[in-house]
Image (cartoon, grey):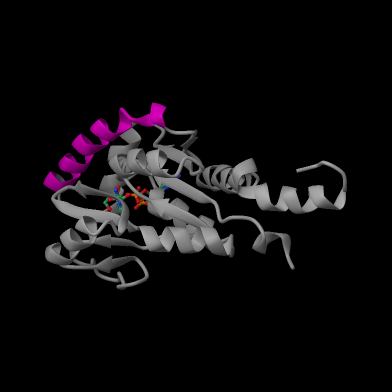
Amino acid sequence: MKERSRRRGSVVIVSAPSGSGKSTLIRRLLASDAALRFSVSYTTRLPRPGEKNGRDYFFVSAARFRSMAAAGELVEWAEVVGHFYGTSKRQVRAAQRRGEDLLLDIDVQGHRQVRRRLPEAVSVFLLPPSFRELARRLERRHSDAPQVIRRRLANARREMRHWREYDFLVVNDRLPEAVQALRAIVKAARCRRTIQHAVAQRISKTFGGNQA
Ligand code: ADP
Ligand code: 5GP
């Protein structure tokens, strides 16, 4: 049996102010790491062009979302710019049990809740190089109207206040370097003692004596 199948799956949380390059970074990270899965959240917002139900999000009604939250099926949930977003408890538990590593793309409110409930999770906050550069990237992306960009920038100011709550900080200045830093964090998350517990116990046993 491969060692990977004996350890628990790790959980890596990534948060960032909108426009920092989080989607770009996550896409690259997932493409280069076959063992890393994206946690597909539930949301009440409508799909954007190109988004697929079950791949990017599970798109659900507000009534369905509320009943999931009330039934305790979400490990965390939050309201972000007028819509609800949440992470399925079952999905996280199944991945941990199967030894699959899971990447959670969630906001600062969700991060606080997951930290309380899953202390073994590792968290990363992505920072843009500066406020000006963030504004430039949002303008260059051409996906939002000027008033939406203004709202995203106001949100970004609020979100930036939370960087102290995270384990790791990655500045997305040069893209390849930021991807490399994220890869290193994912590797380190897999090596956490809490994740490797069963592996260490199995190896300890081969040493005989009182190694528990
Ligand atoms: P987010 O998911 O955080 O909202 P995106 O991934 O959509 O951000 O990135 C916002 C814009 O910035 C996109 O146009 C993207 O191509 C660009 N971008 C991302 N990372 C960098 C970088 N390191 N340098 C320059 N531009 C970047
Ligand atoms: P978007 O609508 O642009 O895909 O996401 C908006 C924000 O919601 C992003 O900051 C994203 O990280 C956050 N988000 C996405 N899924 C979840 C989730 O399951 N829980 C929480 N708390 N935030 C989420």
Q: Nearer the viewer, residue 178 or 146?
A: 178
The image shows residue 172 at horizontal and vertical percentages of: 46, 40
Q: Residue at x 20, y 68 (%)?
A: 60
Q: How far across and down, in percent of the image, does residue 58 sit?
A: 29, 68
Q: Quadrant of the N terminus?
A: bottom right
Query: Which residue corresponds to the image point at 52% horizontal and 58% vertical from the top-left?
Result: 96
**Boundaries of the magenta span:** 147-165
Residue at 35% from the left image edge and 36% from the top image edge: 133
Quarter location, residue 212: top right
Question: What is the number of callouts on the image?
Answer: 0
Q: In this view, does 192 lie to the left or right of 174?
A: right
In the drawing, does residue 4 fall left or right of residue 38?
right
Query: Where in the figure is residue 180, as x and y percent of width and height?
Result: 59, 46
The secondary structure making up most of the magenta span is helix
Q: Can residue 45 be seen in this view?
A: no
Q: Along the horizontal axis of the image, is 46 left or right of 97?
A: left
- Position of residue 196 relative to residue 43, above or below, is above
Residue 119 vs 101, above or below: the answer is above
Locate residue 51 relative to residue 184 in the image: left or right: left
- 65 is within the stretch colored magenta: no
